[in-house]
Amino acid sequence: MLRFLLCSSATACAFALNAQYLISDSLMIAYTPTELAAQGITGADYTVEVHRLIYNTVDPFGQPTTASGAVVVPVGSTCQHAMATYHHGTILNRQDVPSRISSETIVGYYLAADDYVAVLPDYLGLGDGPGPHPYIHAQSEATASRDMMRAAREFCAQHGVQLNGQVFLTGYSQGGHACVATHRLLQEEHPFEFTVTASAPCSGPYDVSGVQAEVMVSPDPYPAPYYLPYVILSYRYVYPWLFGDVSEIFEEPWATQLPPLFQGNNGSGVVDDIMPAAPSVILIDSVLQAFISDPDHPFREALRDNDLYDWAPACPTRIIYCEADDHVFHENSLAAINAMQNNGAPSVSGLSAGAGLDHSGCAFPALLNAKMFLDSHRTPCSTIGIAEHDGAQWSIAPNPAQERVRIARDKADGAAQWRLRAADGRIILNGRFAAGAVEQWLEIAGLANGLYAIELEGERQGAVLRLAVER
């Protein structure tokens, strides 16, 4: 079988040929197009496989370590694929990761079903990675993701999965933070090895020292109080000079009760069950007051070290958020958008995925919008697969549209069902494409401006078309 990798530079090719990062891979599960459709993932032409990768990387101190992650690939496709890296949200239990088929691994199924090679890092200290997880630590989020992408590239070279050199990044919650950290690292330190094509971080804490730090000092209840001890214990590991014993940070009983719960064996609910509604209550008052009164407090400086808004992405970047997000405040996104644009990044834009949606409710529409954005910058598959060749090719025009849009296929074929889905997942319109028909006009005058998906399910082939409504 012909195996090749399209490298962006001689350095990138050297990485692939020397196989410096990938330690092992193991097949975890595979889904046929029919099985994917049963999960609501339509349009796949090929079976997708999920592999666990173990790979070499570095710890927060630059020392060699290992980490794990999942790669999801379409099997048997002759396409040259874009690589899309998805960064998962906050977890405490080291088993709740993509390489263990977590709930977020499904994002990889959606991507691979649409001919991406999906790369899902677990991050350091989770999955098979040793040691504690350095939570909201930008540098190690980025290096773990970069080296996972290198390992995935080596995996593709070994298994005959062809890559086209395009690199896309996205992620949600902590994953939004990790996405931006990875983007910055690749742009600033590895621009010839990985040239980011487009990036779509969602609902991330980009202003850790400002907007998000308000949780620490606020006397008000907060829906995820475990975040605060997670950050403090993580930074105590990464920045050992910040704090002494936990008894010098936390009031009792939390000084005794909290540390054992952050060993990677518990979920967030176990921590929240013993936390007060207002997270700041766990802090010794002198620690809290010192943080409030000193703008250059060492902990504040450590948080600033992990802010991600003050730079200028060079490629199209869409920062997606929801105004009612009660976990990661949407002002993080507004601060990042404003700072990046002021730094000379006109390709950075923002998008609300739903003004009334909280953190949980924001996830699906935000990631759907993120995928549509990435799709709009992707080079189509350069080789026509068998399923594509046998079935009709679908198109929509005009796009963007205002009042009407035409769905068409290049030849008469069997009947097909279609659904027009909003970015929040709601089905707005649906209908049927008669057998033998080659076009159908949809009236969309009543639709609000935004991105939509037109899903088509035919007798032999499905498709998802992206529609923008702009007036």
Image (tube, rainbow, N blue to C red):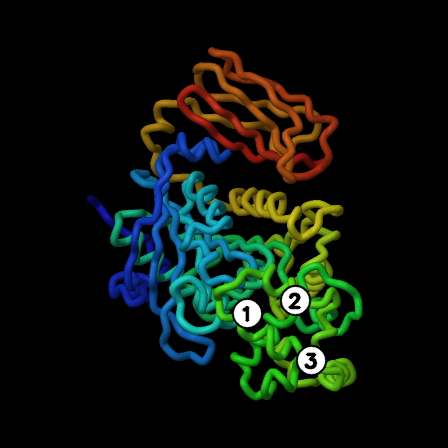
Total numbered circles: 3
Q: Is residue 96 left or right of residue 277?
A: left
- What residue lies at 74% left-to-right and 70% top-to-bottom? 214
Res 80 seen here = no
The quarter of the image holding the N terminus is top left
Q: Secondary structure at mark 2?
A: loop
Q: Residue at x 63, y 43 (%)?
A: 365
Dot 3 alpha-carbon crowd within 10 angstroms: few under 14, some 14 to 19, many 20 or more: some
Q: Is residue 196 above or below residue 109?
A: below
- On the image, the x and y values in percent for residue 229 come to 62, 72
Q: Position of residue 52 (x, y in %)?
A: 35, 55
Q: Secondary structure at mark 3?
A: loop
Which residue is depicted at the point 74% across and 52% down?
323
Question: Of the numbered discs in the image, which one, if any, rests on residue 261?
Answer: 1
Of pointers 2 and 1, the one earlier in the residue sequence: 1
Between the residue at mark 3 and the residue at mark 2, the CA separation in whole angstroms equals: 13 Å
In-front residue for pair 283/120? 283
Q: Which residue is mark 2?
A: 274
Q: Quadrant of residue 48?
A: top left
Give, as a three-letter code, the residue at label 3. Answer: Glu
Judge the density around disc 2: few (<14), some (14-19), many (≥20) Cα neighbours within 10 Å. Answer: some
Dot 1: few (<14), some (14–19), or many (≥20) neighbours within 10 Å?
Answer: some
Does 272 appear above or below 353? below
**Chain-order first, disc 3 or disc 2:** 3
The disc placed on residue 251 is 3
Name the mark on residue 184.
none
Using the image as rendered, state which of residue 89 and residue 375 is in the foreground. Answer: 89
State yes or no: discs 3 and 1 in contact (Cβ < 8 Å): no
Where disc 1 sits, the SS reads helix
- Residue 139 placed where, x, y %? 51, 72
Q: In what quadrant of the picture does the C terminus appear?
A: top right
Callout 2 touching callout 1 (CB < 8 Å): yes
